[in-house]
Amino acid sequence: MKQLIYLSRAYFYLLTNSLYILLAGVLVVSVGCDSSLVSNQGTMPNGQIEQLNTHSQRPENAINHNMLGQIRAATAKYHDVTMAESDGYGQGTPFIPNMGYHYINGGLMDLNIDITMPEALVYVHHPNDPNSRKLVAVEYLVPDVLVSSEEDLPDLFPGDHDHWHHVEDAGVWGLHAWVWYPNPEGVFHDTNPRVGTGD
């Protein structure tokens, strides 16, 4: 499908420019969404996002919200995409519907995952500046050559709602955490219908 083709091309480029094996895509093929990309994308205070995570995002009430707060504190500087680029993140995909642009740091891709140092940052068009980016999520990545099955993947969060997804053609496992933009499907869901298609 079109999104997967974009994904494969983008990650092939990263593979040829990295010393890390199988730096590959992390996205599932998304289903189109009619919602506007930038509607309701106002910047939200941490407390308001915390409340949305607790009350709006379905079964994640049992999540350790202190952990989500740690992720926000560690990644707040990356609202400025130039800071992300200076720390080794580079744009690895075009805009993926219901996800966004993925900026990836191949140097972090291994099994020693630190939730405060995500392998990917997810951005959308900034509602106030079409030439800028707005941080909406982080993503944790593990090349599938490092694990033999999903059971070998790190258990990053308490509870049963943080499910890794596997993209076979891209050779990677991924786990999103929508810590900077509320997701009605859940904080760990692969896609976010509020992001829209980018049209």
Image: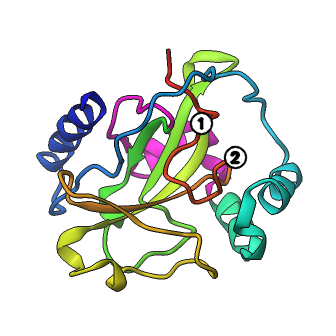
Q: Within 10 Å of the Cα at label 1, are there few (<14), some (14-19), or many (20+) other Cα atoms?
A: many
Q: Quadrant of residue 181?
A: top right
Between residue 76 and residue 145, name the one nearer to us. 145
List x then y, in percent, for residue 85.
44, 42
Residue in the picture at 30% in, 57% down = 106
Question: Which percent across, then down, holds residue 109?
Answer: 32, 66
Q: CA distance from mark 2 to mark 1?
A: 8 Å
The crowding category of the residue bearing disc 2, from other C-alpha atoms within 10 Å (few below 14, some 14 to 19, many at least 20), is some
Up/down of 189 relative to 78, above or below: below
Residue in the image at 28% along x and 49% along y:
25
Residue 23: horizontal and vertical position, in percent? 22, 56
Figure coloring: rainbow
Looking at the rendering, the stretch of residues picked out in magenta corresponds to 75-98
Question: What residue is disc 2 on?
Answer: 184
Mark 1 element type: loop
Would you say residue 63 sits in the magenta stretch?
A: no
Left/right placement of residue 23 relative to residue 89 reads left
Question: Is residue 198 toward the left or the right of residue 165 in the image?
Answer: right
Asked which secondary structure carries label 2, the reply is: loop
Mark 2 belongs to which amino acid?
Pro
Q: Amino acid at mark 1?
A: Pro
- According to the image, label 1 marks what residue? 193
> Is residue 57 found left or right of 93 in the rendered image?
right
Report if the CB atoms under discs 2 and 1 are less than 8 Å apart.
Answer: yes
